[in-house]
Image: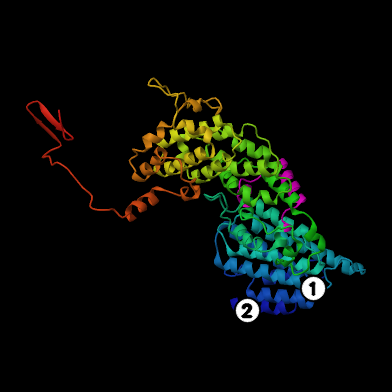
Amino acid sequence: MAKRGKSEKVQKSKKLKVSEPGTQSKSLAKTNTLESPKAKYLTASDISRLVKDVTEKSAYNSIVTLLEELRKCIEHLRKSEDVAVEENARLIAVSLFKCFEALFSGQAMALELKDEKKQLVARWLHTKYASFIAILAELIQHNLAFELSLQIDALEIYLKIVHMEAKKTGEFPVVTYRNLVKLLLLSEIGSSLSDESTDNFLLVQFAESFSQYWDLQTYFFSNDLAEELDECAEKQALPSMLFPNYFTLIRSGLLYTTNDDELRSLPNWVPIELPDSAYKFNIKTRYQKCLLTVLKNTELSASQYKALLSILHKRIIPFMAVPAGLMDFLTDAYDQQDDDVVPILALNSLWELMKNHNLEYPDFYTKLYSLLTPTLLFTRYRSRFFRLCDLFLSSTHLSANLIASFIKRLARLALTGSAPGVVIVIPLIYNLLKRHPSCMVLLHNPDATSGYVDTFNNSETDPLKTGAMGSSLWEMETLMSHYHPNIATLAKIFGEPFRKPSYNMEDFLDWSYMTLMESEKTRRYRGLASLEFEEYDSLFAVGEGKAFVGGWLL
């Protein structure tokens, strides 16, 4: 009976005729959707035949069957992982793209035809084309039961659609591409990594193409995208992955340059020559609008602040039309009290705006002084801070009271700081004294008497009111007896005439405990080291009311 039923189905399928567009062939759907429980989905041969019906016989109703079959496969994959169903879905997705690619290359989807019947068919095909794109969008934005290569295929097909439409129209398909961009930014797939990027495998895949093709970067940033994100924020809260998704794409910078010749030499994703206007308009305005929209609609965590501020000055500000638009963001970051690292990272960008974009920040040095805390010498960003601190204090027009306060605060931190941090502080203090001779009184104060009292107030927050000019650098003499020989030797420079040139700070910024140990291991000693010790039978020897503790008779 089973063989007889199968032969009847085959005979029926040979007699099928394709109906007019807009009406679904029930017999076709019944024939191809196998009723056997072991074969609930179309076979590869069925899919291949349906594609031929579309491309060779203009049997467009087969597209409806393929779309329904693809939806059914996706619904199954939402619930459980199934390799066979996934392979089937991949084949259907690729087959549908081939169908629409063939239809685009011909006149079947041309809406400007004068024949009303053909126009009706073309409009119907466009609705099915939109349905296909909607299915791809669903695969790109939402999670399935497992991460499947079907979703990567959906992304690649979507990018090929951008390629196909550009080739057909002779222009970059801005609307289609903007929808893809929105899907990727609002994607629910993946999670945030420790560096605040995303592990969304689709967005990482897209980022590879995004970093190589200038046109994908240019048309990524649009005013419409910023407006749509604002609308989404008004209707409902934007997903928490918005910032990681956006940050993953922009953290490496852009290929954009104001040189037209350089832009024209860069590769394009679309296989057409972009119009001259694409090379002449300024991307910076749209880039800035998108960035500010993301920041406005995202409540950044401390780690996200750090990740953004660490690249802001080099990979974001150069591509902004008006970097002064970041003034409020940076001043808020610089004024944060809860985290010492965020203000340190904000220094780079804040200085960039002050130096090149006329930002006024009257309390800049007061805030900089407040960052000199005991934790500074232990933070991973101390090299960046001291590099900038050396730059900020390089002007000879700064007040002697201000410089003296910084010198005293740094010297006080060196007493309790880590050895690698002290290695940075000592050369910096030496350079400040060389650069500002009026502060040399800190090394030799002729007014000091036997009843001298240190006038420096370490708890004062205003560097102009600390009384540092009446103090002395007794901390440097203390460091001459430091437990680490390198630091003790380095500190002894303050007991010698100031005839040596200033130190190159780059030679000291990257020191760590490991490099200090390596320097000791490779040091060549002259002669033999002398050791002297006295042996004891026990740690505590009690007898006749006396005890030896650590070699001392008590």
Q: Is 222 one of the magenta-colored residues? A: yes
Q: Is residue 460 left or right of residue 94?
A: left
Q: Nearer the viewer, residue 76 or 431?
A: 431
Task: Name the one closer to the observer, 37 or 100.
Answer: 100
Q: Which residue is mark 2?
A: 4
Badge number at residue 105: 1
User: Residue 118 is drawn in which quadrant?
Assistant: bottom right
The residue type indicated by label 1 comes to Ser
Q: Quadrant of residue 298?
A: top right
Q: Quadrant of the C terminus?
A: top left
Q: Which residues are magenta?
A: 218-245
Q: Position of residue 509 (x, y in %)?
A: 48, 47
Residue 65: x and y, percent?
72, 67
- Image quadrant containing the N terminus: bottom right
Report how far apart the C-alphas of labels 1 and 2 lie in the structure: 43 Å
Q: Is residue 183 magenta?
A: no
Asked if marks 1 and 2 touch (Cβ < 8 Å), the reply is: no
Give the amino acid type for the residue marked by disc 2 in the picture: Arg
Q: Quadrant of residue 73?
A: bottom right
Q: Residue at x 65, y 32 (%)?
A: 362
- The reply to whether residue 41 is visible in this rendering is no
Tag 1 secondary structure: helix
